[in-house]
Image (cartoon, rainbow, N blue to C red):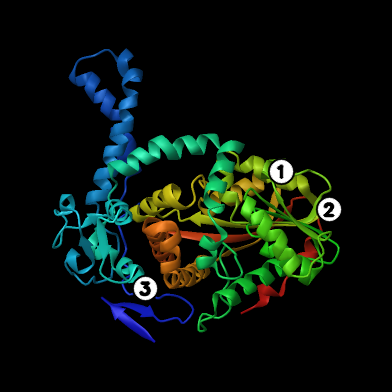
Amino acid sequence: MTSETSGLKLKNWAAIKNPPYPAEGAGNQTFSSYTLFGIVLGGPLFLIIYFRLSLLFYPFLLPLGLPIFAGYFYLSSKYSAPYNNKVQLPGRKIEEYIIIQDSSLAIYSNRNKIPMELFFENYFDGKIDLRGDALEILESRHDWASFEFTMGQFKFFLTQWIPETLVHSKKQDEEQVRDHYDRGDDFYAAFLGPRMVYTSGIISDQNKCETLEEMQDNKLKLVCERMRMKEGERHLDIGCGWGTLVAYAAKHYGVDSTGITLGRNQTQFGNNRIKEFGVDGQQARIKCMDYRDIPRSPKYHKITCLEMAEHVGVRLFTTFLEQVRDMLEDDGLFFLQIAGLRRTWQYEDFIWGLFMAKYIFPGADASCPLGWVIDKLEVSGFEIQSVDTIGVHYSGTIWRWYQNWLKNKDTITAKYGKRWYRIWEIFLAWSTIISRQGSATCYQIVAHKNLNAFDRAELISKKLLSF
């Protein structure tokens, strides 16, 4: 079944939350890097000419480029027009979407759109309420919200995001992971469900509404099959979460599986899960440690890393991959599932990314475009065997997480408060949209060491002949 909006045909798939208003926002299609660098470098030069100063002052005036840079981004995000937008929005008043409880925000009324960052910060603080379901309201966000940068975002970027990106010490990573994942297993179970898998599931049929559990089982099987796991092989799962993949691989494929996590709660949960799966503790185990402390021997036949490498950080990413290569047998396989961003960006992408860095995944700054990830893998001595983009699968997964979260509203609010409930409500609703429209996505990459002696013929797959 399809519907139309200004000539754009919309489909109605059973597997995902379908977009009613997939509007395009302003972004790099109308953004000029040449203009930006021109004013950043030319601004100090203009001052020298205007005030008749010596060129020797130029290096000392270059720091002015930072506020010039911020000002240019602010003005561009505020006034740039969308590119190639074919969607007709409802054109409703902002009051039909949100209820503003604070008089200081009264300026945002009728058709005067509220900046997205200002909206969600005040929603978390209880100064704004919603007129209905968060996901449905966010589907119409281009009708009532703007995606301009605010002082709050510039401040967070300069004082928190940049320092965290540059450091990524063991202490920093440990504090961020434990503050996040040791909040309480019940908090995560409220949306992850019984599988307790905090990574994208896999849709097997876009015309079928599979359950979250079916999608996660699809993913667990896919990973093990792609990795060609065999009985007796040594398997390492870096960033194993609550240990479900470790237990699954050991039980169904007979591998000797080790999971690594910094979360104390996850470690205990994962080792209990292994027992629940009927797997002997000598065959599978979860260890609480920093990935940098994993012993280099014995080497592993199969190494998986599902959505943990983002937390390694941009600065340490190549070092991490070199460590993985060192821990992998020469004939082994490496499975990397990693969240990524599109290179053809829109301003919304940045605003969502800063929101995620502040509230959901602090320190996960290595979510980058696919080309960057592939380059780092190849520089680190890997050859790419296959790449799949599973962003729309992630949208279907998060949509199911969102539905679970709504069902558990009373329980979560009673124990963790309204603010935590609202933060995850917006995270799950907005991310359902973001991953569906490609702002952020997820890649599944299978790689091996780039050695002359590697048996590449063994990896020939019938997938290439699937028409």
Q: Amino acid at mark 3?
A: Pro
Residue identified by numbered label 1 = 323
Q: Earlier in the sequence, mark 3 or mark 1?
A: 3
Q: Residues within 10 Å of mark 2 (few under 14, many from 20)?
A: few
Front-most of residues 195 and 125:
125
Circle 1: residue type: Gln
Residue 430 locus on image (x, y percent): 39, 62
Q: Amino acid at mark 2?
A: Ala
Q: Which residue is mark 3?
A: 19
Instruction: Verify CB contact (< 8 Å) between mark 3 and mark 1.
Output: no
User: To which residue does mark 2 refer?
Assistant: 453
**379 to the left or right of 178:** right
Counting from the top left corner in percent of width and height, residue 350 is at 38, 50
Which residue is situated farthest in the bottom direction here? 1
Q: Please tell me whether mark 3 sits on a helix, a strand or a loop.
A: loop
| Location of residue 276 with respect to 204 vertically, above or below | above
